[in-house]
Image (spheres, grey):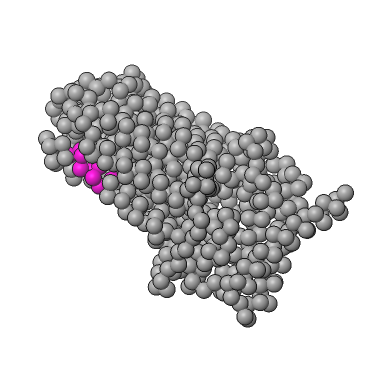
Amino acid sequence: MTFPTLFSQKKYTARYPRWMVGKPLLYMSSALASLGDAMFGYGQGIMAAVQVQPSFIKRMYGKTVTLDQVQAGNTGIDPLVQAITVSCLNITALFASIAAAYICDHLGRRASVRVGAIMYLIAAFIQIFAPNLAALIAGRSIQGIGVGMLSMTVPILQCEIAPAHSRGLFVSIEYICLNLGYAVSAWVGYGFFFAIPSEISWRGPYVVQAALASILVAWTFILPETPRWLVKNGFRQEGLGALADLHGAGDVTDPMIIATYTEIVAAVNFESQMGEASWRQLFTQYTRRCVVGITCQMFAQLNGINAILYFLPENLTRAGFTTARSLLYSGACALVYCSGTIPAMFLIDKWGRRAFLLTGSIALACSLSIVGGLQFYSDSLPEGTARLPAADGLFFGVCLYLFFFGATWGPGPWLLGAEIFPLRARAKGMSLSTGTNWLFNFIIAFITPPLFSAIKAGYYFLLVGFCFISLVVVYFVYPETAHRTLEELGEVFGDKVMDDEAAAHEIAERNAAALRGQVGSAIENMDSEVTLRVAEQSKTQISSDKEGADIEST
C-alpha cells in the first residue's frame, strides 16, 4: 500500500451551520490558516529574545554571564555554534517546503496544514523542556519541518479560497499575520524577561508557542478543504458544497456559485489535459519567470531582513541599550514592521510591483547605511551612557528599515511568486521560489554571527551592496505584472506558448461559457445532482473539442 493510498481521504463530509457560512467562514479560514505564518514570525522573535538572557546562555552554551556582560557583547559564545543554533530551522524548512508540494496535492490543503501544525506543537514541547543545546537544536529542526510545510501550503490555500478580486488582499493578510507573529513574540519575550534569573524567562515563550500550535491543530478539523482540491480529486459534489459555504449562504443552487464552480471544473479539466510542466519546461519555456521567482526571494533575504530580525535585541544591546530596553525597543520595532505592510495592501496593485521594489531597494540601502554608520560611531565610544545618543539614532534607522521592508520587499516576493507562474507550472514554480527563500534564509542566519564578529558594523554595508544589486536586477529584468490578467503574462514575460496549450486554453474558455449557459437554463429546477451532471459533461465535451481542434489543425 502506497503512502497516498494509506493517508488520502476516502470521503469528505463537512458542512457548516447557516450562521457560520459565507464571509464569517471565509475570513476565519483565512485568518486562522495564516496563524501558520504567524507562528513562523513568532519563532523568529523568540529566538532573538532568548539569546540575550543569562539563564538561557548558561543552560545552552554553558557560559555564566551577567546582564552587563551580555550588554557589552562579552558572552564568550562561539559565533559558529550560535549560527548553527539559529539556522538549523531554515535548512529543514527548505526540504520540508519541497516535500510539502507532494503532501499538499495528495492529502489536501488542510491535512498539510494539520501535519505542519502538529510538527510545530511537538517542537514547542521539546524546546519547553530542553535540557541542553542538542535538544534545543533538535526541537528547532523539527519546528523547521512544520514551518516549511506551512509556508508552502498556506499561500496555496489562501489563493484557492479567496474571491478572484481579492487575492492580493488575502496574500497581504497572510504577510501581516507573519509580522504580527513576530510582534507578539517580541512583547512576550519582553514580558517574560522580568522573570530572570528563573528559566521560565526563556521557557515561558515556548509555552505560548505550544498554545498557538494547539489552536491551529484544532482548527484544521473545522477548516474547510479548498473547492479546487476537492474537484480535482473527485469530490465534485463536496467541492460545490465547500464553494457555497465559503462564498455564499450555503446554497448550492446560487447562480454565482454555479458559475464559479463550472469555471473551476473547466480549469481542472484543462490542467488534466495539459499535464503538469516538467522541471525542464519550467526552466526552458518559462525562463524569465523562473529568474524573477528565484531572485525576488533571494534578494528578500540578501537585503538583510533576517540579519536584522534574528539578532535585533543583541544588536541593540551592542549599540548601547540595556538588555531590558533592547527587548522593549525590539517590540516597538516589530509594531513598525507590521505597519509597513498597510501601504502595500492598498497601493501595490495601483502603483505596480516594480515601483514598490525599486523604491524599497533605495530606501533599504539608505536605512542600512544609517544603521551601519551609527554602529561604527557607537563602537568607537566607551561603553555606558556615552553610547546612548548613537543608539537612539540606530534604533531610528532600524525602524526606518523595517517599515520600508514591510511595505516593499516583504510582501512583494510572495505576491510575485503566487502570480507569475501559469497554472500547469504553478506548484513547481512556487516550490522553486519558496525553496529559494529558505535556502538564503539559512545562508543569512548561518553567516551573520561570524561576519558580525569579524567585520562588525561593516556587515551592514555588505547588505547595502546587495540592495543596490537588487535595484539593478529589478530595473532591467522584472516586468510589471500589475493590471494584467494571468493569461496576459505570457506576452509580458515573452514566453513561447506551446500550440497545444493555446488550443486547450481556447477550448476551456469556450466550454466554460457553454457550461454557464447550460446551467442558466437549468437553474429553475436546480439541485446539486443536476449541477454535478452538467459539470461532469464538461470533461467529455472538452476532450471531444480538443480532438476536433487537432483534426482541424491537421
Q: Residue furthest top?
A: 454
Which of 214/320 is in front? 214
203 inside magenta stretch: yes
Q: Which region of the structure is painted magenta? A: 201-209
> Residue at position x 49%, y 31% from top?
468
> Residue at position x 56%, y 69% from top?
257
> Residue at position x 42%, y 49% from top?
113
299 inside magenta stretch: no
> Residue at position x 36%, y 42% from top?
119
Q: Position of residue 362 (x, y in %)?
A: 46, 37
Q: Is residue 225 left or right of residue 423?
A: left
Q: Is residue 410 left or right of residue 428?
A: left
Q: Do we see residue 151 in this rendering?
A: yes
Q: Do we see residue 312 in this rendering?
A: no
Q: Is residue 202 left or right of residue 424?
A: left
Which of 97/131 is in front? 131
Q: Residue furthest left?
A: 197
Name the chief secondary structure element in magenta. Answer: helix
Q: Name the image quarter holding residue 293.
A: top right
Q: Position of residue 82 (x, y in %)?
A: 30, 26
Q: Is residue 337 above or below residue 316?
A: below
Q: Position of residue 545 (x, y in %)?
A: 78, 58
Q: Name the image quarter holding residue 137.
A: top left
Q: Residue furthest front?
A: 1
